Amino acid sequence: CLRHVTVALLNGSADPSSGSIAAEDLAGEAGDGSLRDYWGEYIDNGGQIYWWNEITGEAQYTPPTKQLDTCLAYLRDRVGVPRDMSPGAAAQLRAHLNWAIDLLNGNAPL
């Protein structure tokens, strides 16, 4: 999947061949939505759903599933500026990760 993100970053996700090839290759790869081990679903004081890991104590508002789209969202949400890259590069990477997530979920135009 990151291969498609890389191609989109180099060629632009507006390239029609990038979207159609990636959509064909990634179709059905999002997974079944099952949670990773040791994670549970809870509701915070504001009524928002969050997930908590009983082993590590980590909490997050993105469901920690075994799905590829969730893995890409995890990467997208942890890109640090300026620690990891410049603001412009981070914006491009996040946009292309969102593009790949949308492809996996069948929401991206081809």
Image (cartoon, rainbow, N blue to C red):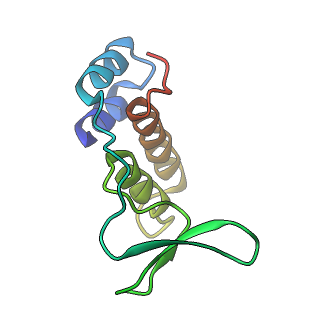
Residue 97 percent across, percent down from the top left: 42, 43
Q: Residue at x 31, y 55 (%)?
A: 66
Instruction: Using residue 13 as the reference point, say whether residue 23 is left or right of it.
Output: left
In which quarter of the view is residue 55 placed?
Answer: bottom left
- Tally the numbered discs: 0
Figure quadrant of the C terminus:
top left
Q: Residue at x 32, y 47 (%)?
A: 68
Residue 78 percent across, percent down from the top left: 45, 64
Query: Does 22 appear above or below 101?
Result: above
In which quarter of the view is residue 17 placed?
Answer: top left
Q: Residue at x 74, y 78 (%)?
A: 45
Figure quadrant of the N terminus:
top left
Instruction: Using residue 29 as the reference point, say whether residue 99 is left or right of it.
Output: right
Q: Residue at x 38, y 50 (%)?
A: 33
Q: Nearer the viewer, residue 25 or 76?
A: 25
Query: Does 13 appear above or below 9?
Result: above
- The residue sitting at the right extreme is 46
Q: Nearer the viewer, residue 27 or 54?
A: 54
Residue 25 percent across, percent down from the top left: 23, 25
Query: Does 73 appear above or below 56?
Result: above
